Image (cartoon, rainbow, N blue to C red):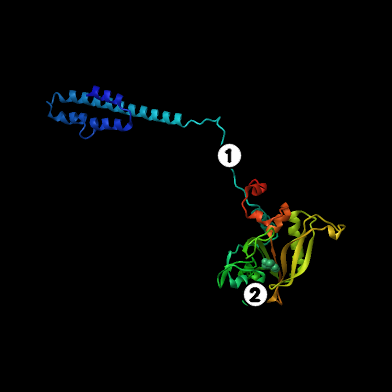
Amino acid sequence: LQERVVQQLSLSKTDDAVEDIRVHLLGKKGDLTKILKGLKDLAPDQRPLVGQLANEIRHNLEEQIEDKRARLAKALLDRQLAAEQIDVTLPGKTVTIGTKHVLQQIQDQIEDHFISQGFQVMYGTEVETDEFNFARMNLPKDHPARDMQDTFYLTPNILLRTQTSAMQARAMDRHDFATGPLKMVSPGKVYRRDNDDATHSHQFHQVEGLVVGKGITLADLKGTLQALTDELFGKGHAMRFRQSYFPFTEPSLEVDISWNIVDDQTPAEDIRWIEVLGAGMVHPNVLKMAHIDPEEYTGFAFGLGPDRFAMIKYGIDDIRNFYLDDLRFLKQFSQVG
Ligand code: PHE
């Protein structure tokens, strides 16, 4: 029996085969088990001798089985290691790491600047109600100025927001003025039915700004915007304020920034202006609808176009570049981190 098992073991090539042998030998009905069980039928004087022999054989075979298993396992590991060897001399695969979109970079810079000035950042939703996008901004249903913003309506009362100004009323509703003035910026995408060209896109970005408190004036608006411009583009870019009209501000302004660096000596005709934002003092009606007393509180608001800011900062002349996902364009703005 012992010889036969040793022979079988030497021939077996897998762990399963070894297990098979073990079961046939030492299992409940195994050959050696039968012998050990048969001991009781032997004459009493023969039992110790046969028993001892049988047990020795069992130990010996158990050891050999274990040994065989270990060798099989090692062989398997060796084979795996050989198969998985890495050839370090092969050329590597280039891993392309994605980077932040240039518009996201500008938005982050604008947010960081305003956070450093004590503003909170609020994110609205791109699907808005007519109430917040228009009505609460002093644009009731039949208001002619609604035509200024050709709107994608989803239902008669739900739309894709045309302006981040939709967040103004939400911010005022949420703010507890007993704690101090409201200072917030709200960045995001807005949508208007527009024919896309070099300076227009049916989808673009805005960053809304709103400050409401006691004694806020137009001078605060100017100072706030100049600080942002200095931070983003460096000093020397002039700002120009032009009178304008928005239903939710009075007075209303349009603000241009000079592409080029200028000073007091620069002749007017050498300054190249680009319009970057709309702004003004918050209209009393807008305050009233938020249950804020316009006699006690005033505020300024602005809505700036980060797309335009990026165009100035990086000298980009076509807004469609931001949305075409051309890697040759996007890679110019890849940054580390
Ligand atoms: N919401 C205006 C627009 O989209 C911009 C604006 C914001 C004007 C805040 C005044 C105050 O054109």
The residue that disc 2 covers is: 139
Q: Residue at x 85, y 60 (%)?
A: 268
63, above or below 198, in the image: above
2, above or below 226, in the image: above
Is ligand 1 closer than 8 angstroms to the Cβ of mark 1? no
Give the Cα distance between marks 2 and 1. Answer: 54 Å
**Mark 1: few/some/many CA within 10 Å (<14, 14-19, 20+):** few
**Can the viewer see residue 23 in this picture?**
yes
Disc 2 or 1, which lies upstream in sequence? 1
In the picture as drawn, the residue positioned furthest to the right comes out as 265
Q: Nearer the viewer, residue 316 or 34?
A: 316
Q: Nearer the viewer, residue 332 or 52?
A: 332
Q: Specify the amino acid type for callout 2.
A: Leu
Q: Nearer the viewer, residue 131 or 213?
A: 131
The residue that disc 1 covers is: 94
Quadrant of the snapshot with the N terminus: top left
Q: What mark, if any, has residue 320 been given in the picture?
A: none
Residue 317 location (% of width, % of height) = 71, 54
Does residue 247 appear to the left or right of 79 in the view shown?
right
Residue 20 location (% of width, % of height) = 27, 32
Is ligand 1 closer than 8 angstroms to the Cβ of mark 2? no
Q: Where on the picture, by quarter, is residue 312?
A: bottom right
Q: Specify the amino acid type for callout 1.
A: Thr
Q: Where on the picture, by quarter, is residue 14?
A: top left
